[in-house]
Image: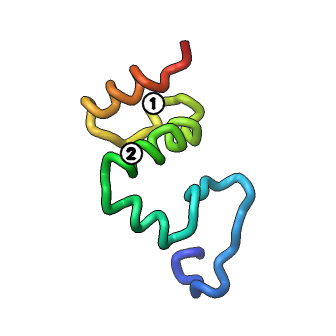
Amino acid sequence: MAATRRYQSLRSFDNLPELPSGYPLMFAIALTPPLWYAVMDKRVVDWADGDFSRLNVLPPRLASLSNRYAPV
């Protein structure tokens, strides 16, 4: 069970999503929400393979994401 693993024994898998940078830079980016969304929105949509039903976001935000990143 992964929830009981110690941090030092956690494993990495190739097919899992990753943050675009290390923790210090991501913490700094998270302090400015517009910057966070600019960096992460496209990555989240790519992770979901364009299937917006897999994204857990508020409906108005979902409409904005689908308008911006939906395949043409």
Dot 1 crowding, Cα within 10 Å, few <14, some 14–19, many 20+: some
- Residue at point 60% right, 57% down? 18
- Nearer the N terminus, badge 2 or badge 1? 2
Q: Secondary structure at mark 1?
A: helix
Place residue 62 in its image quadrant.
top left
The residue lying toward the viewer, choosing from 2 and 52, is 52
Mark 1 residue type: Phe
Place residue 12 in its image quadrant.
bottom right
Residue 44 versus residue 31 in the image, above or below:
above
Q: List x then y, in percent, for residue 23.
A: 51, 71
Dot 2 crowding, Cα within 10 Å, few <14, some 14–19, many 20+: some
Indicate which label's residue lies in the foreground, 2 or 1. 2
Q: List x then y, in percent, for residue 61.
A: 30, 33
Quadrant in which the C terminus is drawn: top right
What number is the disc on residue 39?
Answer: none
Q: Which residue is mark 1?
A: 52
What number is the disc on residue 37?
Answer: 2
Q: How many marks?
A: 2
- Residue at point 72% right, 62% down? 13
Quadrant in which the N terminus is drawn: bottom right
Q: Secondary structure at mark 2?
A: helix
Farthest residue to the top: give it.
72
Q: List x then y, in percent, for residue 38.
A: 42, 42
